[in-house]
Amino acid sequence: MNNKYFKISFFNLIIILIISVVFSYSLGNLLYKVPAYEKIEIFISSSYIDEDYLSSKMKIDSVKEINIIPRSINNNYYEETLQTIGIYSDLLIIPEKYLNNEEKAFSFSSINKSYFEECNLDLSSFELIVYDDNIYGIVIYDKNKNINLFKDKIVFENEDTYILCIGKNTPNVVNTPTNKKETNNAYKVFIELIK
């Protein structure tokens, strides 16, 4: 009789052990959050974006998560959204008219010309946004100049000139990483998007 209780107890112990392992694994996955230096956020001023295409272009080894934040410029709260969410994104695709020279230097990271050369990209093939001899972005859409780097992958809503630039308030814009929490992932993804 004692042996019968032992079998039941052993069986219950195995079930409890299996449930515990499944629960702890599930809870661990729920609580794990990708660190900011392993994810890229891109703020895009558009109402239509081919997110699968963009995500595949932005995929690099050191990035675990990609967040695409589309916002229509026709939205009543577009400017507020740009100032509260967009400005803190790693990358931005926005109309050039929303920038003035002071904002370029204050809110956006400059891109060293040598970085383009290291990636074998010819600067002369791009229209650059330059202020005080620093590159702050490139034109990706200008209807009047027949520039459209993303063709039908991003639909631009008006005749504005749109630029791709890098946000300054992120751990992904360090030219020479000093620790594991700072990367140059934003620069890497920027280059992948324009290749």
Image: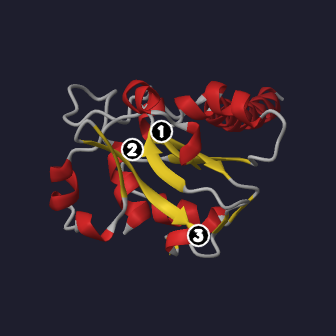
Q: Residues within 10 Å of mark 3 (few under 14, many from 20)?
A: some
Amino acid type of the residue tagged 1 in the rendering: Asp
Amino acid type of the residue tagged 3 in the rendering: Lys
Residue at image coords 60%, 35%? 86
Residue at image coords 84%, 36%? 76
Residue 141 percent across, percent down from the top left: 54, 64
Residue at image coords 53%, 47%? 96
Task: Tell me the CA gap for discs 3 and 1.
Answer: 26 Å
Q: Which quadrant of the figure contains the N terminus? A: top right
Q: Residue furthest front?
A: 144
Q: Vertically, is 103 above or below 78?
A: above
Disc 2 + disc 3, Cβ < 8 Å: no
Q: Mark 2 vs mark 1: which is more N-terminal?
A: 1
- Say if residue 33 shows up in the picture: no
Front residue (pair 7, 185): 185
How many dots with numbers? 3
Q: Residues within 10 Å of mark 1 (few under 14, many from 20)?
A: many
Question: Where is mark 3, residue-wise?
Answer: 143
Q: Viewed as shown, does residue 183 lie left or right of 48?
A: left
Residue 37 percent across, percent down from the top left: 41, 34
Amino acid type of the residue tagged 2 in the rendering: Ala
- Say if residue 164 shows up in the picture: yes
Q: Vertically, is 115 above or below 110?
A: below
Q: Secondary structure at mark 2?
A: helix
Residue 72 percent across, percent down from the top left: 76, 49
Q: Viewed as shown, does residue 193 lie left or right of 125?
A: right
Question: Where is mark 1, residue-wise?
Answer: 90
Residue at image coords 23%, 37%? 175
Q: Nearer the viewer, mark 3 or mark 1?
A: 3
Residue 22 percent across, percent down from the top left: 69, 38
Q: Secondary structure at mark 1?
A: loop
